[in-house]
Amino acid sequence: MDDFSDSVSTTSSSSSSSSSSSIITNFPLISAFFAFTIAQCAKFFTAWYKERRWDLKQLIGSGGMPSSHSATVTALAMAVGFQEGFGGPLFATALILACVVMYDATGVRLQAGRQAEVLNQIVYELPAEHPLAESRPLRELLGHTPAQVIAGALLGIVTAVIGHAIILVCSQI
């Protein structure tokens, strides 16, 4: 029984160590992470350009130019395609996920943000004695315009292509 326990613990510890090292070298994960980070940083600067003030919330918030959701899922899909092939079921799954996320960003989330604007205006115009007059405003920047989603998708594609090119060049060395 001791030999069996030793072999099980050895197998599980070796597989967990290989799993942790594979996360570090997981191209789709790294590509998606970089696309997200670049998009969030870009929002910080596009918000400054538009409003002429620094807003640190842009580094972690949703909405704005470019869409970090779109950048993340397109980088993920492209990296999966490069790694696993564009004809396989894994790429198909990643592509469908990307389409759903981008559709949601320009549809439901954008409309919810527009409704929040209207509701905030209604609450702002309420008399001071109304019970809702002191309620906290709803977040208005939830979704994305089609241009923001397209910009995010292009950023994601470019990020994955550059990452793939780096991998190809490094494998030649």
Image: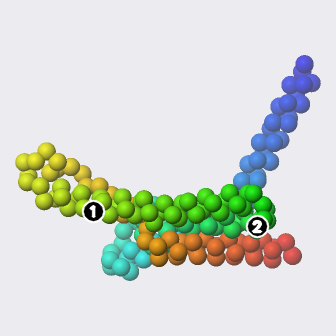
Which residue occupies 7% across, 48% down? 129
| Residue 79 appears in the figure | yes
**x, y percent for residue 47:** 39, 74
Q: Quadrant of the N terminus?
A: top right
Q: Which residue bears the numbered disc 2?
A: 86
| Residue 37 appears in the figure | no
Which residue occupies 36% across, 79% down? 50
Hey, what amino acid is under mark 1?
Glu
Quadrant of the rendered structure where residue 5 is?
Answer: top right
Compare marks 2 and 1 and give the one earlier in the sequence.
Answer: 2
Spatial CA distance of label 2 from label 1 is 41 Å
**x, y percent for residue 46:** 42, 77
Hey, what amino acid is under mark 2?
Phe
Residue 50's place in the image compared with 127, above or below, is: below
- Residue 117: which disc? 1
- Residue 16: which disc? none
Quadrant of the rendered structure where residue 107 is?
Answer: bottom left
Query: Relative to 134, is 27 on the left or the right?
Result: right
Q: Nearer the viewer, residue 163 or 94?
A: 94
**x, y percent for residue 108:** 42, 59
- Colouring style: rainbow
